[in-house]
Image (cartoon, helix red, strand yellow):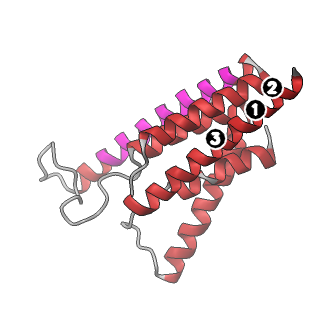
């Protein structure tokens, strides 16, 4: 029976990686992360966590997902308040910078859903994945800014950096 559990766990991980790949492809092509890819990451990751380590790892993943969503909501709120301060003449429903072609917010709903799904999928090793994801994002953006290929107001698709998360979780562990 242990052989079946390991095979199902490996299949769950494969499904998780496939859904992350789909999210990356869509984010690069359309600048949108499909909800179904996020749900797939969460469900496949949930199955892998339950099959491999049981309910405690799932609880850790859910706790990290809750904290991540709260931090993202706080960051969005803070960025909107700062944007409002820079451009107080805008009506309340208009996001400053949106008319000039700038991205309306630094992180979108698809990014937040994918972050929460990756938290569930990686459980207690989520901080290791976050560290690799953040390091990759900072490195690429710093190089882009230094070379002049990227400006501060440019938006970048975030899913390719989020794809580093499961790799970091597997390699670096909890």
**Mark 3: which secondary structure?**
helix
Q: Residue furthest top?
A: 55
Q: Earlier in the sequence, mark 1 or mark 3?
A: 1
Residue 9's mark? Answer: 1
Marks 1/3 in contact by CB < 8 Å: the verdict is no
Residue 2 lies in quadrant: top right
* Residue at the disc numbered 3: 15
User: Residue at (41%, 73%) from the top-left corner?
Assistant: 151
- Residue 5, disc: 2
Q: Is residue 75 magenta?
A: yes
Q: Which residues are magenta?
A: 58-80
Query: CA–CA distance between discs 1 and 2?
Result: 6 Å
User: Distance from label 1 to label 3 (Cα)?
Assistant: 10 Å
The residue carrying pointer 3 sits among few (fewer than 14), some (14 to 19) or many (20 or more) residues within 10 Å by Cα, namely some
Taking the spot 30% from the left edge, 45% from the top edge, the residue there is 81
Where is residue 20 shown, x and y percent of the image? Answer: 57, 48
Residue at the right extreme of this rendering: 2
């Amino acid at each position: 029976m242990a052989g079946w559990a390991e095979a199902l766990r490996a299949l769950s991980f494969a499904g998780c990686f496939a859904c992350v790949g789909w999210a990356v492809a869509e984010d690069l092509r359309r600048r949108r992360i499909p909800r179904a890819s996020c749900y797939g990451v969460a469900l496949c990751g949930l199955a892998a966590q339950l099959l491999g380590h049981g309910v405690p790892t799932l609880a850790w993943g859910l706790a990290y997902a809750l904290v991540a969503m709260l931090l993202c909501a706080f960051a969005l709120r803070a960025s909107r308040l700062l944007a409002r301060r820079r451009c107080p003449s805008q009506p309340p429903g208009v996001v400053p910078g949106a008319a000039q072609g700038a991205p309306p917010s630094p992180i979108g709903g698809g990014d937040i859903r994918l972050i929460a799904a990756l938290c569930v999928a990686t459980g207690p090793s989520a901080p290791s994945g976050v560290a690799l994801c953040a390091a990759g994002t900072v490195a690429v953006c710093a190089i882009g800014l230094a070379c002049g290929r990227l400006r501060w107001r440019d938006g970048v698709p975030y899913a390719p950096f989020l794809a580093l998360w499961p790799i970091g979780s597997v390699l670096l562990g909890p």
